[in-house]
Image: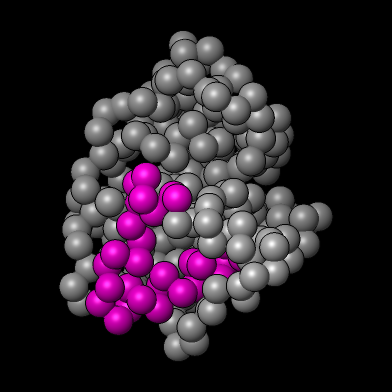
Amino acid sequence: MSVPTANVAQHLEKLVDAQKVDRLCELLLEEKAEAEKFGGSLPMTVVFVERKARADEVMELLNAEGVSAAAFHGGRSQQEREAALSDYKNGKCSVLCATDVAARGLDVKGIAHVVNLDMPRMFEDYVHRVGRTGRAGMTGRATSFYTDRDSYIVAQVKRALAELEAGNAFAFATGKEARAKEREAAKAWREGREEEPEAVGGVNIIVDEKFKHMKIGGAGAAEAPKGNADDAFGSDDDDDW
């Protein structure tokens, strides 16, 4: 089980695909400028994308915009991934552009922000992605860009956040049983046998404009488990990773 949202502020922002990369640059440049006002640098950030080529493209664009970034995905050799991870941990770059190869097992201290440039296919993958921040008692935040095609998973996220705020930490359960239930619910929805999961209102998922404050999750939320080192260098089953 993973409960990354206990101390992670989460923000959902609806865009069209063509707007995503520009919005990402705007967001990170704004945060970098804000940090530099106080003599700091852009906090450690992971940007999750769907495909390997997109990770490389986003990395190159961010570097061109003055935001130091590295790419981490299954299309890179182990040596290249180790070098990218080393640069990230040592502060030589502030942003890691990654596919889901980094969503599970990547245990890096100090990640402050997770950005879902592309929403994952499964809710459990969302849980693992967001679980890269807010670790070891620290606060973190997650920003997710979504489009109309992501409506089902977004509704799941909103419902889980409402449950967490009410004290139900199991809303973010992972594992074999959770995956089976998710597949069953998604199939029923596609076949028109069920409505889209209800997005319960009243959940504050918008972070402070200047990113200075973090929302702490509801009472009763379990502590997020420490990550295990490290299956992030494993082989990829999906050639798109």
In this view, 86 is above or below 103: above
Specify the quadrant that holds the C terminus: top right
Q: Which residue corresponds to the image point at 77% horizontal and 62% vertical from the top-left? A: 16
In this view, 38 is above or below 212: above
Q: Name the spot of residue 160 as percent of width and height, x first.
A: 41, 70
Q: Name the spot of residue 83 as percent of width and height, x first.
A: 45, 18
Q: Which residue corresponds to the image point at 45% horizontal and 57% vertical from the top-left? A: 181
Q: Which residue corresponds to the image point at 21% horizontal and 48% vertical from the top-left? A: 225
Decide which of 174, 5 is in the foreground and name it. Answer: 174
In the rendered view, does 97 fall on the left or right side of 178?
A: right
Decide which of 202, 8 is in the foreground and name it. Answer: 202
Q: Name the spot of residue 103 as percent of width and height, x first.
A: 44, 40
Write the start and end of the magenta stretch as one range: 152-180
Furthest-right residue in view?
A: 18
Magenta part, dominant SS: helix
Q: Name the spot of residue 56 as percent of width and height, x first.
A: 66, 30
In the rendered view, does 167 fall on the left or right side of 215?
A: left
Q: Which residue corresponds to the image point at 49% horizontal and 87% vertical from the top-left? A: 201
Q: Is residue 125 visible?
A: yes
Decide which of 164, 107 is in the foreground and name it. Answer: 164
Q: Quadrant of residue 207?
A: bottom left
In the rendered view, does 63 fall on the left or right side of 69?
A: right
Q: Is residue 209 visible?
A: no
In this view, 167 is above or below 69: below
Decide which of 129, 111 is in the foreground and name it. Answer: 129
Task: Report the number of numbered marks.
Answer: 0
